Image (cartoon, rainbow, N blue to C red):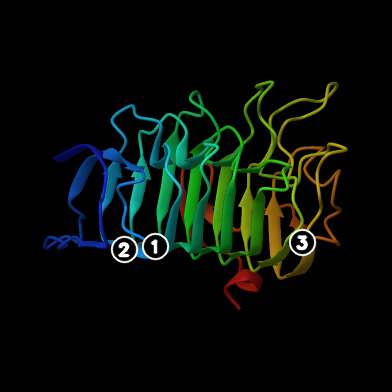
Amino acid sequence: PYSMSTAKPAASLSLKGELDGDGAKPVVQGQMELTAALADGAELYFENISFDGNGGSRIVNHTGGAINVKSIKFVNCEFTNFLAGLFYSNSNDVIVVDEFVFESCEIHDIAGSGGDAFDVRKTTEIGSLSFTNNTIWDGIRTMFRIDASDAIKLGSFEFSNNTVKNIATMDDGNNRGFFALRVATEMTLKDNLFLWEDGGKTDDTDKAQLFQNNTNTVVPTLTASGNWSYANGKDFFTKVSASEAGFKTINVDPCYNSKGNFFQLAAQDLID
């Protein structure tokens, strides 16, 4: 693997991996910090890279400095072996990201012991956040945590055409479920498949929840349809019902073996 340790980009960056004959991506170990050194209006683009966190927290961390980023895009990348996951912003200095994209990525085996995956705590403004055509499995504490603050803004949020298995199900007091949104936004939630979203609790509250069942949760203005869920826990649809979230639940594994992480669809209804 290539080691980038903790990279601190100073200007726009485009990194595209060259696939080998078997289609394997080059492996890059490390993470990135966004600081005041980053040029105004920078664009950060990554494609065909396997990011190995090597026990680090997240692939992108805003560690300070008021910065304005035009776009951050990950396309056909892999993320694994991080303690928390993808993005962290907990600085009093504002970060503005016009467009934040994860497209056709694989995100898996994230320990969830070092925080939440996409975690916004303080002054952060994201114009649009887009997760499309990704496969996400096994691990993560809270998938999306967007805290309540007048200084936090999320213009629009799309989560479409993703396959999700056993994410944000752990019995941890800091697990806020899959979507823990505490600011208003417009959200598109379409054509996703959720599998094994069950923390196993039968008497107590199960932590596996599509939207966190909490009085502070702000349910977004939803455009939702075409979603499916298999083997979800009892509290998965407590805050927002399956019908409100555009879900149908199914009783037979729609994949060849989703528990074993073979996600090829076997159910004709979903293929169509």
Left or right, residue 162 beside residue 155: left
Residue 34, quarter of picture: top left
Q: Are the residues at dot 1 and dot 2 in contact (C-beta closer than 8 Å)?
A: yes
Q: Nearer the viewer, residue 113 or 235?
A: 113
What is the quadrant of the N terminus in the image? top left
Categorize mark 2 by other alpha carbons within 10 Å: few (<14), some (14-19), many (20+): some
Could you say where residue 159 lies in the image, as x and y percent from the top left?
Answer: 61, 62
Determine which residue is flagged by label 3.
247
Q: Residue at x 85, y 45 (%)?
A: 239
Determine which residue is flagged by label 2.
45
| Amino acid of disc 2 | Tyr
Give above or below for 260 relative to 267: above
Give above or below for 141 relative to 131: above
Residue 229, quarter of picture: bottom right
Label 3, label 2: how many angstroms apart (C-alpha)?
33 Å
Judging from the image, what secondary structure is the residue with disc 1 in? strand
What is the quadrant of the C terminus in the image? bottom right
Could you say where residue 85 lies in the image, as x and y percent from the top left?
Answer: 45, 39
Judging from the image, what secondary structure is the residue with disc 2 in? strand
